[in-house]
Amino acid sequence: METRIAGHLALISLYVVTRTVGLPPVGPLAGETEPVGALDLLSKSIEIGLVIILSVLLRGAYRSRTASA
């Protein structure tokens, strides 16, 4: 579950970078930013919610393991 959280956070970070700074850092399109769309924002909002839910579930699983030990 931790790898899923890390993966989603990496995708969210990549989205923010491509919309603010632009990728790739070198080449003919260096620094070109991508436009922000409504569906993009919706998908990232859902992804942020998923990260929160997975974090809560992970915390609960960790607490139940330490309480039973």
Image (spheres, rainbow, N blue to C red):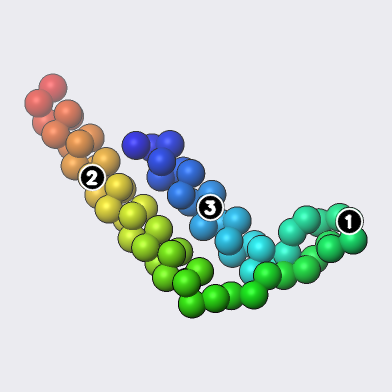
Residue 59: quarter of image: top left
Using the image, determine if residue 20 lies above or below residue 13: below
Q: Amino acid at mark 3?
A: Leu
Q: Amino acid at mark 2?
A: Leu
Mark sitting on residue 27: 1
* Relative depth, front residue between 60 and 5: 5
User: Residue at 20% across / 36% down in the picture?
Assistant: 61
Residue 24 relative to residue 48: left or right: right
Residue placed under numbered mark 3 in the picture: 11
Q: Which quarter of the image is occupied by the N terminus?
A: top left
Residue 45: quarter of image: bottom left
Q: How far is disc 1 from disc 2 in space, using C-alphas?
A: 42 Å
Q: Amino acid at mark 1?
A: Gly
* Relative depth, front residue between 15 and 60: 15
Q: Secondary structure at mark 3?
A: helix
* Relative depth, front residue between 65 and 48: 48
Residue 29 is situated, as x and y percent measured from the top left of the image, at 84, 63
Q: How far is disc 1 from disc 3 in space, using C-alphas?
A: 22 Å
Residue placed under numbered mark 2 in the picture: 57
Residue 62 relative to residue 17: left or right: left
Residue 52 in sight? yes
Residue 49 relative to residue 38: left or right: left
Q: Earlier in the sequence, mark 2 or mark 3?
A: 3
Q: Earlier in the sequence, mark 1 or mark 3?
A: 3
User: Residue at 47% across / 72% down in the picture?
Assistant: 39
Residue 37: quarter of image: bottom right
Residue 20 in sight? no
Residue 32 is situated, as x and y percent measured from the top left of the image, at 78, 68
Mark sitting on residue 44: none
Residue 7 is situated, as x and y percent measured from the top left of the image, at 48, 44
Dot 2 alpha-carbon crowd within 10 angstroms: few under 14, some 14 to 19, many 20 or more: few
